[in-house]
Amino acid sequence: MADVTDLAFTTRDRSWENFAEEKFRLAVEACPSGMAMTDGAGVIVLANAATERLFGYRREQLVGRKIELLIPRRLHGEYHKQRAVFALHPQARRLQANRELFGLRSDGTEFPVEVWLNPIHSGEGLFVLSVIVDISERRRMDRLKDEFVSTVSHELRTPLTSISASLGLLLGGAVGKLPDAARRLLGIAQTNSDRLVRLVNDILDIEKIEAGQVAFNFKRIDVRALAGQVIETDRAYADGFGVRVRLDPTAEAAEVYADPDRLAQVISNLLSNAVKFSPRGGEVAVTCERRADCVRISVRDHGEGIPSDFKPRVFDKFAQADASDARQKAGTGLGLSIVREIIARLHGTVGFEDAAGGGTVFHVELPDGTQVADRELDAERSPDAVRILFCEDDPDAAMALRDGLRPLGYSCDFAHDAADAIARARSNAYAAIIVDFELPDAGGMRFVCQLREQPEIYKTPLLIVTAEGGGAANRQEFTSLNVLDWMAKPVDPYRLAQALDCAVARGANGRPCILHVDDDHDVLDLVALALQATARVVSADSLEEARVALLAHDVDLVVLDITLGPVSGLELLPELKKREGTPIPVIVFSAHVADLAADPQMQPRLNKSQSSLDELVDAVRDRLTLRPSRDEEDLP
């Protein structure tokens, strides 16, 4: 009876598994986005109908083929790097969110795509489910929106400004005294033209901020002093509404790290909103206070307050509690939405609450100076990570680079201005320093010269990143300052890691780097010991580890076993031809060398069972002497 019961449960379990597999298959098939599953070797094992439509292949033409079939050839090297990093840290993620990706159709045409990777663990190993979305239409709509915004900016804002200025001149008596009726009509025209100019400016501001087209120049700011400046600037506006504005005498001096111009815009928008909805003769107060881990800036009015049903929509675009009242107050319905977008970029929060005794208090909270300083140091770095310093005023860019470099063996600290960069570089042992050439208040070349004047870091390798790119004149000018390389923004962490490895590993001791690939750990240990006097040896027991090592180190020579369990070490060869200059030379050290085809890249070929470690050492030394020097590689 027990056997029968077990059989029943087994049958039921298999039926459920079959049911679940069928449901999964149907879900994948019905998905409007392309879905392709690959195995550990990058071979397609599943593709849905949407993938067929996107790329123009039949399913039987895809299954069993490498995923590179769907990727333009120029992106193959980048794909291999991404795959190696994903194998090291398999987790759901968007592929290269900050870079453009393209798919390759069967007819050879390319189209922009967005790709999400999802790991699927099974008894057969790690599979990767790629969700591929064609974003051609999204790109087209983005271009249309950009063209519209550009048209508004150039074709509408300029004539509106001229109209408003002309009306102002007429009302100011530029053509003599006007009849009262004419003055009233001109006053109405000027008020509405000013309102239209504000609306157009607000639309352009919020579009640019949301599109990431607004540059934020971060620096340390005394918020009380900044609030006082904004109040004085906006006092005339408040006087027009018969409202007093003041800085609360209890306001505390506090420091934040933000863009002063954008933070001033936030305070000004909150002030104008409070003034418009305050009664004539009322008062608006601004205060600043320190909190446990932030600085709060509050603007309090004495108006009628915000209706309960409108509170959830306060920060929405064009949101108006009472449209007729808003028209009387000349509101655009965008001021608070702009506040929210700016504060998000400043890594803060915005909110409001009903004020005691009537009115509303709007507040923004920003991290205080201590929090910013703590975040600048990489507290999560691993003990063996190479420590570098990134001089960059944009926290978003700094955090993105830190996240990109961490899987590649680098720990990145930040300095957001020149003074902090010099102080931090002098007090910490950094293997290299990356400098944003457009760092505010640093002066580009002057800042680099200041770094080189410090006795502690005058030999530390420098890399410069710039939005403009490094021209030939700049490169020549900086040669004497030991500038390793120039890179364009946004920084590619993979290319940067290669440059850093060259600076750190080769620049520090001049020793070449050898990658040894073998699945026998005893052989790995013996070879590392035998070659330690000749070179720095990086050991890898699989193709995946070898690819990560190639990404993280500037490899001069590869010692390769062509038999790595069920896979062949020869699969690594195409990736050893990606380096600029000559291909990376390979010494075959394997039990199976007799049947290898002739290839000048793979010389010599040593049989493990017949060759001694001394022969391998001699072969390595001979092969390295044939390697061109770094200067020779750079020659055209």
Image (tube, grey):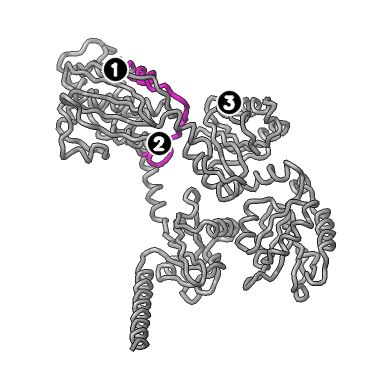
Q: Is 298 in front, or is 1?
A: 1
Q: Relative to 50, is 420 on the left or the right?
A: right
- In the rendered image, which quarter contains the N terminus? bottom left
Tell me which corner region of the image, top left, top right, bottom left or bottom right, holds residue 82: bottom right
Kindly identify which residue carries mark 2.
347
Q: Residue furthest top?
A: 177
Tag 3's secondary structure?
loop
Question: Are discs 1 and 2 less than 8 Å apart at CB?
Answer: no
Q: Amino acid at mark 1?
A: Asp
Mark in front: 2 vs 3: 2
> Tag 2 or tag 1, which sits nearer the N-term?
1
**Residue at which label 1 appears:** 248
- Left or right, 344 with reference to 86: left
Bounds of the magenta segment:
207-232
Look at mark 3 in the image and give the residue it sits on: 443
Residue 519 screen position, x and y as percent: 67, 66
The answer for how far apart the CA atoms under marks 2 and 3 are is 26 Å
Question: Is residue 204 visible to us here?
Answer: no
* Label 3, residues with CA under 10 Å away: few <14, some 14-19, many ≥20: few
How many numbered marks are there? 3
Q: Is residue 201 above or below residue 403?
A: above
Amino acid at the residue labelled 3: Gly
